[in-house]
Amino acid sequence: MKSVISAAAIALTAGFAAAATHTSTIQIDHGRATVSNFTGPGPLSVNLNMATDTLTPASGTYSLDIPAAGTVWQVFANGSIDVDFDGDDVFETSLSVDNVLVDSSWTSPGFFTSWTGMYVLPIADFSFDTTPYGGSGSILFTGVSATVTGVDLDNTAAAGALGANAYADLSIDAATGLDEVKTLLTAADMLGNGDGILNFRFNSNLAFTLVPAPGAASVLALGGLLATRRRR
């Protein structure tokens, strides 16, 4: 009986050790953002990438700490994305991600540096400065979310520099503010080349922390205990 109890304690300890937190980070300076779908219904379509279209080249680094495949985690995000709308290196708008819960039960696929899916990232309310687009003030965005549908770091290492073709595809939706901004973006596009796409620059600094999902460690421990009993 003592050996069973000892085995259970070892299994429980191993379970919690295997379920230590994991944090991955990504940092980008002078990345390029293209925004579309501002002439019709639905969220704004956004592509964030490393393409260089100004005299200031984009740069970015990342570090991935992804747990073993099949383990289950809560995913928290924290950080910011700062946007320069008119290319003057002054960031008119900052999107803040304040340690929000992105997924309460995420099953790790194992190590990866590119993926597709649908990950919803809640964003804190923010004000959009309309003056670069002919407006007279700021519009408040509330109930904001970014739905990420694809990411590729263009590098197969666990950490390093983002590749020249690194990108993230996402859409931005909001309870208020979106329709007013779409009107301004449409007008700004018509003053340009009218191609339905606007280009911006951005900086980002984001961290994603994985915390053991409730019960994950106890399930691991129970598995170890049952395996011990079967061996007996």
Image (spheres, helix red, strand yellow):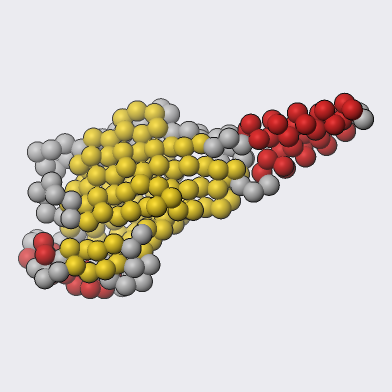
| Res 177 visible | yes
**Left or right: 86 as drawn, with respect to 38:** left
* Foreground of the two, 172 or 82: 82
Residue in the picture at 46% in, 37% down: 23
Provide residue 166's location: percent of width, then percent of height. Answer: 31, 39
- Which quarter of the picture shows residue 6? top right
**Left or right: 218 as drawn, with respect to 186:** right
* Foreground of the two, 129 or 154: 129
Please tell me whether residue 168 is drawn above or below residue 179 in the rendered image.
Answer: above
Provide residue 91's location: percent of width, then percent of height. Answer: 18, 51
Provide residue 60's location: percent of width, then percent of height. Answer: 28, 35
Instruction: Classify the position of the C terminus by image quarter.
Output: top right
| Res 199 visible | no
**Left or right: 43 as drawn, with respect to 30:** right
Residue in the picture at 37% in, 58% down: 123
Instruction: Classify the position of the N terminus by image quarter.
Output: top right
Looking at the rendered structure, the number of numbered marks drawn on it comes to 0
* Foreground of the two, 146 or 1: 1
Determine the residue located farthest toward the left in the rendered image.
191
Please tell me whether residue 36 is drawn above or below residue 13 in the rendered image.
Answer: below
Residue in the picture at 26% in, 54% down: 94
* Foreground of the two, 89 or 150: 89
Residue in the picture at 66% in, 44% down: 216
- Which quarter of the picture shows residue 42? bottom left
Provide residue 129's location: percent of width, then percent of height. Answer: 17, 63
